[in-house]
Image: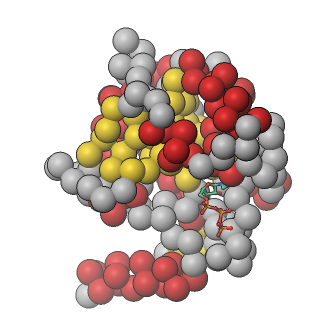
Amino acid sequence: MIKVSEIEVFILAGGKSRRMGSDKGLINFKGEPMISHILRVLDKLNMSTSIISGNKEYMKFGKPVHQDVFPDKGPLGGLYTALEFSSAPMVILLACDMPSINSESLKRLRALATSGKMVVSTDGENISPLFACYPQSLKKAVKKAILREELKMLDFVLKQSYTLLDLTVGGNTLVLQNLNTKKELIAAENIEKDRVK
Ligand SMILES: Nc1nc2c(ncn2[C@@H]2O[C@H](COP(=O)(O)OP(=O)(O)OP(=O)(O)O)[C@@H](O)[C@H]2O)c(=O)[nH]1
């Protein structure tokens, strides 16, 4: 069994944000950068956190910022970077564009991760490899896939053995919502406002 304190978190923020038009983690969502919503939850849980991005602006959040070892290889490249920079037996991988991540779901992910097995999550429809936990032992296989240009993260995940965190059971599937466009961002802000009214 792995101790909760041994698990490190890496937030991927090294994408191109082409659909959003500007860096997704830094764009304002409900009054603060999208990544700040995630960092707040992680700080509350006292989790060791780093950011993976080539954009130095992320340094202002006071967390270590690492650049991709293999640039422009997408989230799978980000996973490799996390495994390379971490000495932890398990790393939790999150995306900077998922501002609804909450502590309940993170605690569930973290608890499953103590088994040492890869964990990916589902909202009942899709599998998310970016609200997930990966063991160090996968590093070689990740590198191999990258060198072969097999960069689809889900394809990689489905070839491994994994545990599924089903957020439809006693959870909140909104956690997995990722915001890729301005339209999605505005809609998500308005849903929240309507709820408050
Ligand atoms: N470190 C790192 N993170 C990445 C990379 N590509 C994507 N990500 C992150 O992975 C998550 C999902 O990214 P996507 O939405 O698929 O891609 P994107 O490039 O950010 O956005 P688009 O250009 O609109 O496709 C986001 O948190 C990205 O910041 C990469 O090459 N390196």
Q: Is residue 107 above or below residue 31?
A: above
Specify the color scheme: secondary structure
Of the pair 39 and 125, the residue shown nearer to us? 125
Looking at the image, which residue sits at the far top? 1
Residue 20 appears in view:
yes
Q: Is residue 23 left or right of residue 178?
A: right
Residue plotted at (70% across, 29% down): 144
Residue 146 figure quarter: top right
Of the pair 75 and 46, the residue shown nearer to us? 75
Residue 149 figure quarter: top right
Q: Quadrant of the C terminus?
A: bottom left
Residue 47 appears in view:
no
Q: Is residue 185 left or right of residue 114?
A: right
Q: Is residue 152 above or below residue 79?
A: below
Residue plotted at (43% across, 50% down): 128
Of the pair 95 and 101, the residue shown nearer to us? 95
Q: Quadrant of ligand 1?
A: bottom right
Q: Is residue 79 left or right of residue 5?
A: right
Q: x and y percent of residue 59 in the render? A: 76, 50
Looking at the image, which residue sits at the far left? 170
Q: Is residue 182 above or below residue 85?
A: below
**Total residue callouts:** 0
Q: Quadrant of the N terminus?
A: top left
Residue plotted at (48% across, 34% down): 159
Q: x and y percent of residue 171 in the render? A: 23, 52
Q: x and y percent of residue 54 in the render? A: 81, 52
Residue plotted at (36% across, 37% down): 109
Residue 87 figure quarter: top right
